[in-house]
Image (spheres, rainbow, N blue to C red):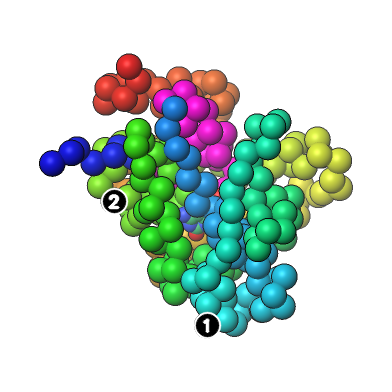
């Protein structure tokens, strides 16, 4: 029997640097990348487009089951996301997009509907899976798991800097409140709550640069023999 395609999971709360680290890692290894948060974000956005309330659990689950989503890479290297052929790349990355994602992600039937889609991405030569429950639920048998975290203030400040750089007007106290609210919902929900897998390597990036975190991650990756 062939050995299973390796998966490296990168879980953690919003703003801990998972997205950046996962991108860098997938690129370095030449592996596929699963941005599972984007699937929840598109589901939330699809509800807005279809006129379905995020609180209408059965209608939201129906949307998730039939989600027509397509990912592509622009010439600039940017990842484009389309729902039914409509470009939703920008809409899903707003604060409102994040709120919708967090709401629909708490619905067990939505998580169930998106599970198989995520597992299908376990393709050769390997997969870097970025999310909240990659190591605990979706890829429980992954040989290497990371849990990236950072203080709420640090995560809110990073997000603030990103939004200001994009020219958006935001308030730091409001962002702090939003992140705390989303953290509470992601951690306390019954379906796949945000917790580190027992065998995850926990990295607190509050006082580290992206380069330092990546070096720490690569050290573990090399120890497993994945970077040859
Ligand atoms: O990683 P992100 O910020 O794009 O995720 C958006 C929301 O989706 C977040 O509030 C939690 C949810 N999510 C989840 O429940 N499970 C995942 N595997 C990924 C994201």
Total marks shown come to: 2
Pick the front one: 75 or 194: 75
Q: Estimate the x, y position of residue 45 in percent, counting from the top left.
A: 67, 64
Q: Dot 2: within a 10 Å radius of its alpha carbon, few (fewer than 14), some, or many (20 or more) residues?
A: some
Q: Quadrant of residue 74?
A: top right
Query: Of helix, strand and loop, which one carries label 2?
Result: loop
Q: Is 135 displayed left or right of 155 in the figure? A: left
Residue at the top extreme? 228
Q: Earlier in the sequence, mark 2 or mark 1?
A: 1
Residue at the front extreme? 85
| Residue 126 visible (yes or no) | yes
Residue 63 vs 76, above or below: the answer is below
Which residue carries the number 2 mark?
140
11 in the magenta segment: yes
Q: Estimate the x, y position of residue 93 in percent, counting from the top left.
A: 69, 51
Residue at the left extreme? 1
Pick the front one: 160 or 59: 59
Q: Which residues are magenta?
A: 8-29
Q: Residue at x 52, y 70 (%)?
A: 66
- Circles 2 and 1, Cβ within 8 Å, touching? The answer is no
Q: Dot 1: within a 10 Å radius of its alpha carbon, few (fewer than 14), some, or many (20 or more) residues?
A: few
Q: Residue at x 70, y 31 (%)?
A: 76
In what quadrant of the picture does the N terminus appear? top left
Pick the front one: 30 or 177: 30
Which residue carries the number 1 mark?
58
50 in the magenta segment: no
Query: Of helix, strand and loop, which one carries label 1?
Result: helix
Pick the front one: 129 or 205: 129
Q: Residue at x 58, y 63 (%)?
A: 68
Distance from label 2 to label 1 (Cα)?
27 Å
Q: Estimate the x, y position of residue 111 in percent, counting from the top left.
A: 44, 66
């Amino acid at each position: 029997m062939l050995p299973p395609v390796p998966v490296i999971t990168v879980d953690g709360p919003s703003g801990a640097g998972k997205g950046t680290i996962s991108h860098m890692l997938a690129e370095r290894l030449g592996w596929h990348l699963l941005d599972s948060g984007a699937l929840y974000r598109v589901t939330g956005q699809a509800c807005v487009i279809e006129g379905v309330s995020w609180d209408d659990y059965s209608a939201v689950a129906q949307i998730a089951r039939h989600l027509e989503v397509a990912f592509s890479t622009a010439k600039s290297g940017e990842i484009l996301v389309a729902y039914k052929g409509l470009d939703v790349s920008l809409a899903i990355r707003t604060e409102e997009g994040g709120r919708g994602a967090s709401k629909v992600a708490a619905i067990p039937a939505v998580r169930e509907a998106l599970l198989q889609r995520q597992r299908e991405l376990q393709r050769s030569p390997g997969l870097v899976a970025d999310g909240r429950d990659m190591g605990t639920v979706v890829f429980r048998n992954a040989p290497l798991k990371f849990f990236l975290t950072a203080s709420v203030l640090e995560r809110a400040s990073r997000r603030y800097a990103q939004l200001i750089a994009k020219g958006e007007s935001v308030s730091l106290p409001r962002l702090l409140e939003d992140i705390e609210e989303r953290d509470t919902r992601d951690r306390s929900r019954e379906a796949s709550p945000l917790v580190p897998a027992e065998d995850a390597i926990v990295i607190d990036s509050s006082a580290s640069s992206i380069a330092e975190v990546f070096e720490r991650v690569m050290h573990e990756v090399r120890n497993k023999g994945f970077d040859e």
